[in-house]
Image (cartoon, grey):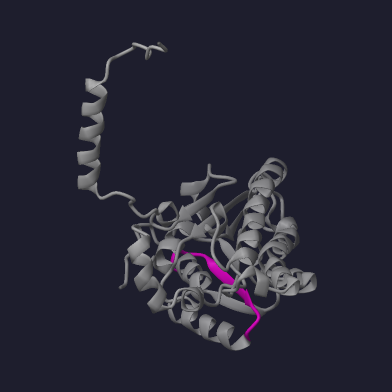
Amino acid sequence: MEWESPFKSDILKGKVALLTGGGSGIGLGISTEFGKHGASVAIMGRRKSVLDSAVSYLQSLGILAIAFEGDVRKQEDAKRVVELTVKQFGKLDILVNAAAGNFLVSPEDLSPNGFRTVLDIDSVGTFTMCHEALNYIKKGGPGRSSTSGGMILNISATLHYTASWYQIHVAAAKAAVDAVTRNLALEWGTDYDIRVNGIAPGPIGDTAGMRKLGPEEISNKSKEYMPLYKLGEKYDIAMAALYLASDAGKYINGTTMIVDGGLWLSRPRHLPKDAVKELSRTVEKKSRDAPVGVPPSKL
């Protein structure tokens, strides 16, 4: 379904955004909405074919878009892509870290190397991109006033708020991403006027993550034991990103916004509603019938 944006089409006019993982899934959803709302968009990813088709798609919508091949795990790639973005567009206002790795695995079957790979992409990769973007995104950076810095947005998850089956590597990595978000918000917010926020998406339809982690067979069963289970759309995450990146979110810093329809709060009911009413009536009656304030005699 095509949703219409509630935001003005020029709220990011004149802004330049660089998005890792911006060529597919949630990253492409954000790239698209940033572009539709006036931003020039640079996307970074490892697969040339994915980048090429993403740029063609963005350009077909009239969006000023370019792509650079690069791996967030390599500092030289991060540095090169940030510099090329600034060379192309003259500045950098928004960095979105959406590149991520994931697969289902139980802890005993996960090698330390597999664990490290996901932390390298999600946690270290996020920090590396922030580190290389700092000189451009801070107040007084190229093409930027001496009083206002840019904005960083890190895509996280809700897995680590409780615990998640077969996701120990990702839960650890996203917990680190949230910590990076808060610490940079404190330090770079203070020193460089950079806002740093995050978004923790729930399950989003039509994404590689959902195809890998929540095949249809699983999501049908999920509805039975997760009362709030429903799929979100890439649009939902992109609208949250737009809000945080625009002036509407100018006083928000150090927050990871949960966009999951309340799913992480889901618990199965241990009693149906009718039983609750019945039970509370019984308990109420018992407490009314009991003698008040007289301790039982020890004799």
Residue closest to the eye, 224 or 122? 224
Would you say residue 262 sits in the magenta stretch? no
Q: Residue at x 24, y 39 (%)?
A: 279
The quarter of the picture where residue 9 lies is: bottom left
Q: Find the magenta span and give its range.
A: 36-47
On the question of residue 69 being in view, the answer is: yes
Residue closest to the eye, 24 or 166? 166
Q: Taking 3 as reference, is 193 left or right?
A: right
Residue closest to the eye, 246 or 198? 198
Q: Position of residue 233 (x, y in %)?
A: 39, 68
On the question of residue 92 being in view, the answer is: no
Residue 154 sits above or below residue 61 on the image: above
Residue 276 sits above or below residue 113 on the image: above
Q: Position of residue 164 (x, y in %)?
A: 54, 61
Residue lying furthest front: 299
Q: Residue at x 75, y 73 (%)?
A: 113
